Image (spheres, rainbow, N blue to C red):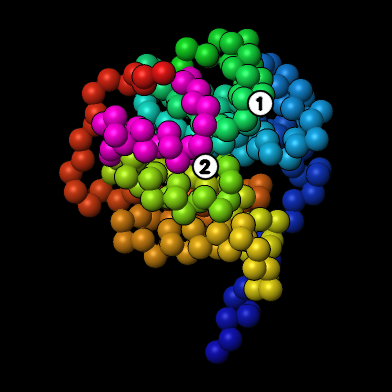
């Protein structure tokens, strides 16, 4: 029997519905709104997450009560503000980016928001930063990771992220629906292929639970299973 009769189209969000969601449940701080408006003036503003997506990320992170969080792809710092909002007292966000210009915009915004002391910015390729954290004793101690960076490196971020995550920790990958391109078998561009592969790999990983939220451009959510007793690391400080 065909499954066609059980299939349902998802809700097609209009601008009016998105505005309704933002006005109903999204509570931005004035500094967040100011940074979002500043970033919207840039030609690359599409790299910034939407407010309702930021609220969703913070909500998910609160479930794991994070003290150690890593962001791969910080851009102008808007998403980091949402991640910091979910941190436990004394918690730290390591914010990775390769662009010194946007990272400086982020640092200025964090200072204005009074959260700069909770963020450790790392300039350079995120794969190198993640390896440095592993070498520095962070294996199995990170509560959450948000990835919104170069798509062809998502597999590497998955590998390194799973080593860094503690059992029960979560890893979130943005843009995994890629404006619908992942469902087009004729689209074989490297970025599209990489996004398909990371989602399929997460779904098949015996050490993880995975799902895709259709919010924004799609968020792959991965939770590391507690297959073995894990131990937390020591302090939350990061060498800068």
Task: Report the disc number at residue 56.
Answer: none
Task: Report the disc number at residue 102.
Answer: 1
Is residue 155 placed above or below 100 in the rendered structure?
A: below
Q: How many C-alpha atoms fall within 10 Å of the one at disc 1: few (<14), some, or many (≥20)?
A: some
Q: Can you give x and y, in whole percent of width and height, for residue 152 in the image?
A: 56, 53
Residue at the bottom extreme? 1
**Picture quadrant where residue 187 is located:** bottom right
> In the rendered structure, are the residues bearing label 2 and label 1 in contact, judged by CB atoms less than 8 Å apart?
no
Q: Residue at x 47, y 64 (%)?
A: 200
Mark 1: which secondary structure? helix
Q: Can you give x and y, in whole percent of width and height, for residue 227 in the image?
A: 22, 52
The residue tagged 2 is: 147
Nearer to us of marks 2 and 1 is: 1
- Identify the mark nearer the N-term, 2 or 1: 1
The quarter of the picture where the N terminus appears is bottom right
Q: Which residues are magenta?
A: 119-147
The quarter of the picture where the C terminus appears is top left
Is residue 127 placed above or below 87 in the rendered structure?
A: below
- How many angstroms separate mark 2 from mark 1 (CA)? 17 Å
Q: Residue at x 43, y 58 (%)?
A: 202
Q: Residue at x 43, y 62 (%)?
A: 201
Queried whether the magenta region covers residue 215, the answer comes back as no
> Is residue 186 at least partly visible in the picture?
yes
Mark 2: which secondary structure? strand
């Amino acid at each position: 029997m065909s499954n066609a009769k059980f299939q349902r189209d998802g809700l097609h969000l209009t601008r009016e519905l998105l505005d309704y969601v933002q006005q109903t449940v999204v509570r931005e701080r004035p500094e967040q709104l100011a940074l979002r408006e500043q970033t919207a003036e840039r030609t690359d503003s599409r790299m910034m997450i939407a407010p309702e997506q930021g609220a969703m990320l913070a909500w998910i992170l609160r479930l794991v009560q994070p003290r150690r969080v890593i962001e791969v792809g910080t851009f102008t710092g808007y998403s980091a503000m949402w991640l910091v909002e979910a941190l436990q007292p004394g918690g730290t966000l390591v914010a990775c980016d390769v662009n010194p210009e946007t990272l400086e915009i982020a640092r200025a915004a964090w200072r204005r928001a009074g959260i700069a002391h909770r963020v450790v910015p790392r300039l350079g390729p995120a794969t190198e930063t993640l390896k440095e954290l592993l070498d520095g004793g962070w294996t199995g101690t990170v509560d959450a990771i948000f990835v919104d960076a170069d798509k062809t490196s998502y597999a590497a971020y998955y590998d390194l992220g799973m080593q860094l995550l503690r059992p029960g920790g979560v890893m979130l990958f943005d843009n995994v629906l890629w404006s619908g391109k992942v469902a087009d078998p004729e689209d074989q561009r490297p970025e599209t292929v990489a996004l398909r592969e990371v989602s399929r790999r997460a779904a098949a990983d015996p050490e993880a639970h995975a799902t895709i939220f259709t919010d924004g451009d799609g968020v792959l959510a991965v939770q590391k299973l507690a297959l073995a007793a894990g131990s937390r690391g020591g302090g939350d400080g990061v060498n800068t």
